[in-house]
């Protein structure tokens, strides 16, 4: 199984990238590629920009990565209760090329934040909307209070209950 995984964040120190990297470690037999949204940087989407430049190569490249995968795992950063600007912009460009951005792939949706909310707002938005964009959502999980529940040195969850929940969600792939 070929799996694409990424954090929906452009931060070089993304806690969501740490979470998604840990999560895919439970997919022992999978061929996993972890993407960095910074490799797919695009100008701010607008219809005027689209008319001027057409379909950007980075959006096409991102869609090609999804096309080549059997499954996708995303961990969402929450910015003011919603998607990060970097993810939303890439998604907007991609949806203009293929409205079914996730191309009927199996998906696991994750989210975390430093606070007790665990980015639940953005996770709920993603879980509710992704099926309209070609995602077959197999499971989702929010990890609250990242720095209390994740060992940075070991790059793993320290809470047994959360760890079990993560393993169960990942087993849906």
Image (cartoon, rainbow, N blue to C red):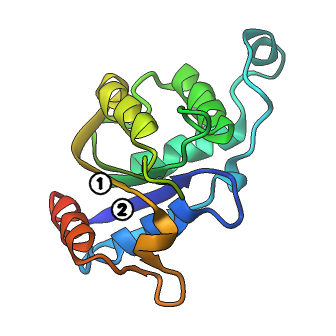
Nearer-the-camera pick, 139 or 124: 124
Residue plotted at (74% across, 45% down)? 41
Q: Earlier in the sequence, mark 2 or mark 1?
A: 2
Say above or below: 125 vs 165. above
* Mark identifier at residue 3: 2
Say above or below: 170 vs 103. below
Quadrant (top left, top right, bottom left, bottom right) of the C terminus: bottom left
For disc 1, the marked residue is: 70
Q: Secondary structure at mark 2?
A: strand
Residue 161 is situated, as x and y percent measured from the top left of the image, at 20, 71
Say above or below: 159 vs 154. above
Residue 79 is situated, as x and y percent measured from the top left of the image, at 61, 39
Nearer-the-camera pick, 133 or 68: 133
Nearer-the-camera pick, 115 or 1: 115
Q: Secondary structure at mark 1?
A: loop
Residue plotted at (51% across, 54% down)? 115
- Find out whether the residues at labels 2 and 1 contact each other: C-beta distance under 8 Å: yes
């Amino acid at each position: 199984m070929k799996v694409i995984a990424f954090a929906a964040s452009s931060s070089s120190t993304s806690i969501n990238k740490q979470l998604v990297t840990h999560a895919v470690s439970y997919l022992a037999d999978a061929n996993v590629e972890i993407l960095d949204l910074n490799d797919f940087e695009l100008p701010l989407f607008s219809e005027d920009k689209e008319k001027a430049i057409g379909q950007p190569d980075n959006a096409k490249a991102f869609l090609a990565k999804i096309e080549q995968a059997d499954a996708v795992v995303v961990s969402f950063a929450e910015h003011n209760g919603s998607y990060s600007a970097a993810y939303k912009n890439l998604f907007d460009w991609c949806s203009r090329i293929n409205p079914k951005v996730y191309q009927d792939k199996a998906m696991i949706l994750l989210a975390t934040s430093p606070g007790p909310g665990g980015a639940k707002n953005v996770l709920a938005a993603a879980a509710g909307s992704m099926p309209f964009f070609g995602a077959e959502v197999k499971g989702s999980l929010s990890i609250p209070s990242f720095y209390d529940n994740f060992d940075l040195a070991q790059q793993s969850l320290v809470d047994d209950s959360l760890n079990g929940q993560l393993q169960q969600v990942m087993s849906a792939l």
